[in-house]
Image (cartoon, rainbow, N blue to C red):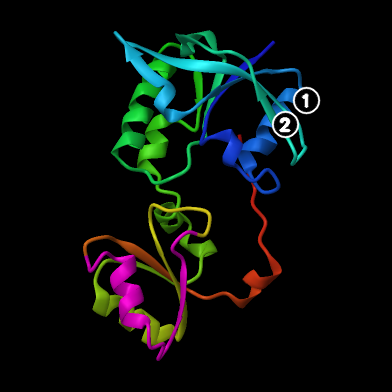
Amino acid sequence: MIKLGVVMDPIGSIKIKKDSTFAMLLEAQARGWALYYMEMADLYLQDSDCHAFMRQLQVKDDPSGWFSLQAGDCRSLAELDVVLMRKDPPVDMEYIHATQLLERAEANGVLVINKPAALRDANEKLFTAWFAQCTCPTVVTRNLPQLKEFLNLHNDIIVKPLDAMGGSSIFRVKRNDPNTNVIFETITHNGRAYAMAQTFIPEIKQGDKRILLI
């Protein structure tokens, strides 16, 4: 039996209808895999080995009660076959440190998905620059005049931070919007943080489709 660990946000607070981690757990359980639940704070390093407080997990597609956890204990991640790193942003220093701990599990033969080094190197928003042929016009900057220039060029844009998720802090800005300055100042922390601006795509109203490769 494959033993699959998952490092994620508190499972009791997720929205199972749209949570991709939950969909993965349902499928893994359907295949007969054993699931082990961890939050980022459960990870720790003992000498050179990554350990965690982990609990065996069962899931079901029921919005009135979608999980149950057994009593947990501390053990080496090397006892698992696979670990999914599914903690949501922000990608702050605590997140970076967690990926470094997970690299020790990887060094001991555990398949960590996604690869810890890749999680650090491939910001999920910036990484679109490697596939510019598939994206709309984009600028990443913390310079307010550059954001205004981009808005004046395209008239209707979306601005968002690089380290958030789930629709957090995303603004649609149209030319001559009276709140333009305060939005740009907020999203860049007054020019101290990079933000992404992209042209607005009206077709987004029809929804989007995402492909997950594991």
In front of the other: 19 or 205:
19
The residue that disc 2 covers is 26
Decide whether residue 179 is among the magenta residues. yes
Q: Position of residue 28 (x, y in %)?
A: 70, 26
Considering the image in quadrants, where does the N terminus appear?
A: top right
43 relative to 21 in the view: left or right: left
Q: Is residue 57 left or right of residue 148?
A: right
Q: Quadrant of residue 52?
A: top left
Whether residue 213 can be seen here: no
Q: Is residue 55 visible?
A: yes
Residue shown at 38% from the left, 88% from the top: 178
What secondary structure is marked by label 2? helix
Q: Position of residue 115 (x, y in %)?
A: 45, 30
In-image side of 94 versus 62 (left or right): left
Hey, what amino acid is under mark 2? Leu
Q: Residue 30 has which mark?
A: 1
Q: Position of residue 210 (x, y in %)?
A: 64, 52
Question: The magenta stretch spans which residues?
Answer: 168-191
The structure residue drawn at horizontal position 36% and vertical position 74%, both measured from the top left corner, is 183
Circle 2/circle 1 CB separation < 8 Å: yes
Q: What's the residue type where badge 1 is placed? A: Ala
Q: Residue furthest front?
A: 64
Q: Residue at x 32, y 42 (%)?
A: 92
Residue closest to the eye, 147 or 18: 18
- Residue 59 place in picture, x, y as percent: 71, 28
Q: Indicate the secondary structure of the residue bearing disc 1.
A: helix
Residue in the image at 43% along x and 19% along y: 106
Mark 2 and mark 1: Cα distance apart in space: 6 Å
